[in-house]
Image: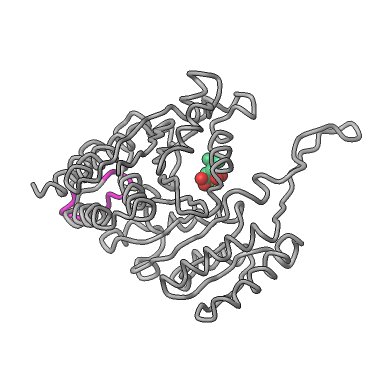
């Protein structure tokens, strides 16, 4: 049966990195007879430029109909002055919400050769392999009331952090399921010493834990979690947390690995359908310079093949090709160290290296 992937390059370096991931897809598609077709749509700022909307109805319905979505990155300073509801970020949030992609997997793992690229001492990060599971369709990102209004003669901005029991339960379940497939340790991160919404979060997570007696559950306040991530990151296996806390902690965790340019992510619905994207943003400052590292997007493609299309052997092949390229000393600027045997390459050359590895040439 044929499979359809919607490709959304987005803005900034998004188009450059997606181009390389699509080349990789073309190779494995042919080698493994995957019968995958792709359809590309403008999204985010690129879509706003074309139609005045960051997410058009056409793109949304194509995404609904697709088997999976591969996204580059969105946003840029060019859109700071666009009306708030037309900004690229709003398109992304709407897409996550419309497709109910509530479960956001953000792994932070370190390629052994890149331990020196981390801002932490190599011994603190060597062998790091953790997963941040971020709730993606609720919390303060979507809660109401929200807005900016005038009260007593001054402007007031407000948002609402709100979680229903069911929303907490389903993300907690995802957390326990993922922990079961890993080292069976789950740390739920909240701010239950201050926020009622976190009090409920903690209660529900504890309730869900009764169905997973093999998983060791712990709780941590978010401020402490931020500190522990940079103090002793290897203490974590799986972290489950709310939308806002996960946004912040996942950037910190990504940096531990030396380069945010290496990290893929998956956003899944209840049926395993998903949108896959690099953890990093659209990096407008380096767009068009050839400095962008396409590996996070190539690894996102691998996650897509593994988790939504169940094509583990094609995914393994991509992961192995990336690992081999790193082992051979091929580096984009963001992961280049002072290694004597390193070759610094641009975005397209990194794509070339992965493709050559896949083709065994
Ligand atoms: C992320 C990004 C987004 C978020 C932005 C671009 C809306 O920071 O995916 O982490 O805050 O969720
Ligand atoms: Mg973020």
Closest to the observer, 236 or 113: 236
Q: Is residue 35 magenta?
A: no
Give the main secondary structure of the magenta stretch.
Answer: loop
Identify which residue, 153 or 61, lies in the foreground. Answer: 61
Q: Which residue is depicted at the point 41% across and 70% down?
A: 181
**Does residue 3 lie above or below 226 as drawn?**
above
Image quadrant in which the N terminus is located: top left
Q: Residue furthest bottom?
A: 213
Position in image of residue 244 (x %, y %): 61, 52
Q: Does residue 349 sit above or below 314 in this rendering?
A: above
Which range of residues does the magenta coloring cover?
332-342
Q: Position of residue 23 (x, y in %)?
A: 24, 37
Residue 291 % position (x, y):
31, 37
239 left or right of 330?
A: right
Q: Is residue 16 left or right of residue 227?
A: left
> Magenta stretch: residue 334 in it?
yes
Residue 44 location (% of width, % of height): 50, 30
**For residue 82, what is the image quadrant?**
top right
Residue 189 occupies quadrant = bottom right
Q: Is residue 232 left or right of residue 286?
A: right
Q: Residue at x 20, y 38 (%)?
A: 349
Report the front residue among 152 and 27.
Answer: 27
């Amino acid at each position: 049966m044929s499979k359809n992937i919607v490709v959304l390059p987005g803005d900034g370096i998004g188009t450059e990195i997606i181009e390389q991931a699509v080349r990789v897809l073309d190779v494995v598609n042919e080698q493994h007879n995957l019968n995958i077709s792709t359809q590309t749509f403008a999204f985010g700022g690129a879509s706003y430029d074309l139609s005045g909307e960051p997410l058009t109805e056409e793109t949304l319905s194509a995404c609904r109909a697709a088997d999976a979505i591969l996204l580059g990155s969105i946003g840029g300073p060019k859109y700071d002055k666009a009306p708030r509801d037309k900004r690229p970020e709003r398109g992304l949030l709407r897409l996550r919400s419309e497709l109910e992609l509530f479960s956001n997997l953000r792994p932070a793992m370190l390629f052994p050769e890149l331990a020196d690229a981390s801002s932490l001492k190599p011994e603190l990060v060597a062998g790091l392999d953790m997963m941040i599971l971020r709730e993606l369709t609720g919390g303060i990102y979507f809660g109401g009331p929200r807005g900016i209004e005038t009260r007593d003669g001054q402007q007031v901005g407000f948002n609402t952090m709100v979680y229903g029991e069911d929303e907490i339960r389903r993300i907690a379940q995802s957390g326990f399921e993922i922990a079961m497939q890993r080292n069976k340790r789950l740390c739920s991160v909240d701010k239950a010493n201050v926020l009622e919404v976190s009090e409920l979060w903690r209660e529900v997570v504890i309730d869900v834990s009764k169905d997973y007696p093999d998983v060791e559950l712990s709780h941590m306040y978010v401020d402490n979690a931020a500190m522990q991530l940079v103090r002793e990151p290897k203490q974590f296996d799986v972290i489950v947390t709310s939308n806002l806390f996960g946004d912040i902690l996942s950037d910190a965790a990504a940096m531990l690995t030396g380069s945010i340019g290496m990290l893929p992510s998956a956003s899944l619905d209840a049926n395993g359908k998903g949108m896959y994207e690099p953890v990093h943003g659209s990096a407008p400052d380096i767009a068009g310079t050839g400095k962008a590292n396409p590996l996070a997007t190539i690894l996102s493609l691998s996650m897509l093949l593994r988790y939504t299309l169940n094509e583990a052997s094609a995914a393994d092949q991509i992961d192995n090709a990336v690992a081999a390229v790193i082992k051979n000393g091929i580096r984009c600027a963001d992961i280049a160290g002072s290694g004597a045997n390193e070759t610094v390459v641009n975005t397209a050359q990194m794509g070339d290296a992965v493709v050559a590895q896949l083709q065994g040439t």
